[in-house]
Image: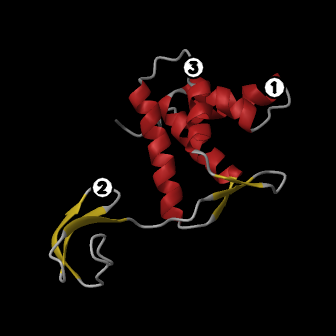
Amino acid sequence: MKCPFCGGNESRVKDSRDIGDAIHRRRECEQCKGRFSTYERVEKSPLMVIKRDQRREVFDRQKLSMGIRKACEKRPLPAVEIEKAVEEIEQELDRLGKQEVSSSVIGEMVIERLRHLDKIAYIRFASVYRSFADVETMFEEIQELLSRDKPESGNGS
């Protein structure tokens, strides 16, 4: 590490602290004894989203958040729950470890979270995302949603 004071190439790490997305290191130059700080961060290449028409665009957390918020508009959901869903999806995408991901993968992640958060928000998002052709298709989706969430009967309880 080059000293910002004398240009010397030798420095000693005096203190290291994890500060979330980086490591803060306090250093001392071996030549002039000047002290300075450095920050170490993992450099990530941006995640590319492959759209339905095969175009690629950089993943935009804000766009994801806006889509979920739009589906949840005027619903009794705390903002913290919506933010948590966005955060979970972003973390799941990071865990995939891929440089490119299909928009359909992200859409399915959103669908899954909304299904558990709010049924109306789920149907709103699904109607746009899955491009329901008519009311019957939407009705079938609602019936499937209701049957999936019904408790099992006849289990002897």
- Position of residue 117 measured from the top left corner of the image (x, y, whole percent): 48, 31
> What residue is rendered at 74% in x and 32% in y?
128
- Quadrant, the N terminus: bottom left
Residue drawn 50% across the image and 50% down it: 90
Above or below, 89 relative to 151: below
Contact flag, marks 1 and 2 (Cβ < 8 Å): no
Which sits earlier in the primary sequence, circle 2 or circle 3? 2
Whole-percent x, y for residue 26 in the image: 20, 67
Residues at circles 2 and 3 in contact by the CB criterion of under 8 Å? no
- 29 on left or right of 147: left
Q: Secondary structure at mark 2?
A: loop
Note whether 129 is above or below 146 in the view shown. below
Examine the image and state in which quarter residue 16 appears. bottom left
Q: Is residue 142 visible?
A: yes
- Residue 13 picture location, percent across and down: 18, 75
Taking the spot 76% from the left edge, 51% from the top edge, the residue there is 51
| Disc nearest the viewer among 1 and 2 | 2
Q: Nearest the camera: 155 or 98?
A: 98
Circle 1: element type: helix
Indicate the amino acid at tag 2. Answer: Gly
Report the amino acid beneath label 3: Glu
Question: Dot 3 lies on which element?
Answer: loop
Nearest-to-viewer mark from 3 and 1: 3
Q: Please tell me the numbered disc located at residue 136.
A: 1
- How far separated are the C-alphas under marks 3 and 1? 24 Å
Q: Residues within 10 Å of mark 2 (few under 14, many from 20)?
A: few
Q: State the residue position of label 3.
A: 73
Q: Is residue 84 above or below residue 134?
A: below
* Residue 20, numbered circle: 2
Q: Earlier in the sequence, mark 3 or mark 1?
A: 3
Picture coordinates of residue 84, whole percent (x, y): 42, 38
Give the residue drawn at x 50%, y 60%.
94
